[in-house]
Amino acid sequence: MKIIFLTLITIFIFTGCSSNKTIDAEPPINEQNIEDSSNDYKTAVEHIMDNALLDSMKNSEDGVITIREKLFIAQTNDIYLNPEDYMDKTIKWEGIYTEVTNPVSNQEYKFVIRYGPGCCGYDGTAGFEILYDGELPEKNDWVEAVGKIEMVEENGEEFIAIRLSELTIMDVRGQEFVAN
């Protein structure tokens, strides 16, 4: 009886609990395979970003890239990560106008932002520093900002800011807290 039981266990171990499906062996990974497949596969974020950016450009007048509530953080991050892709394009977004003063240099910075997830709930921000020569709104006003990227140098480092051509106070507030 033990021999039959051990034989059944051995057969079970070698055959396993597999289905009748066959699995094709993948070709070995080499440099050519990686180069061939690198354009075929994108992360979900890259795929969504490409579609969102295409949609914003298709639905805009004169090629203006409009950043909306949906994917607000992802689109602003893409601009920070790939500023050269956006250098000659007009960017339009809505958000909260705010100002921050550097306590060391006493220099004031102006931003149009939205709140996003951070380490303790919605304590992060997403948006851009703005450079604007016109009349400024009050802090916490909801505004629409339109402008182009400009690289600003400070202390030997380059930073992205948006040189605004328009800054409009809006009557209706949009979504202040964004998640993606």
Image (spheres, rainbow, N blue to C red):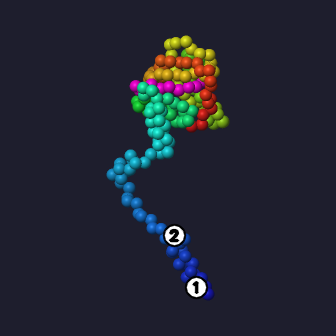
> Is residue 41 shown above or below 57?
below
Q: Which residue is mark 1?
A: 4
> Is residue 13 shown above or below 141?
below
Nearer the viewer's eye, disc 1 or disc 2? 2
Q: How far, Cα to Cα, is label 1 from label 2?
A: 24 Å
Residue 110 or residue 55, whichever sits in front: 55
List x then y, in percent, for residue 3. 58, 85
Tell which circle, 1 or 2, labels the residue nearer the N-terminal end: 1
- Residue drawn where x is 57% and y is 14% of the image: 136
- Residue drawn where x is 55% and y is 18% of the image: 168
Q: How many residues crowd around disc 1 within 10 Å: few (fewer than 14), some, or many (20 or more)?
A: few
Left/right placement of residue 158 relative to residue 95 reads: left
Q: Which mark is residue 19?
A: 2
Q: Is residue 128 visible?
A: yes
Query: Would you identify the image quadrant in which residue 24 lies?
Result: bottom left
Name the residue type under label 2. Ser
Q: Main secondary structure of the magenta part?
A: strand
Query: Would you identify the image quadrant in which residue 140 lies?
Result: top right
Q: Which residues are magenta?
A: 87-96
List x then y, in percent, for residue 148. 45, 23
Residue that extends furthest to the left in the rendered view of this protein: 32
Q: Secondary structure at mark 2?
A: loop
Left/right placement of residue 5 relative to residue 65 reads: right
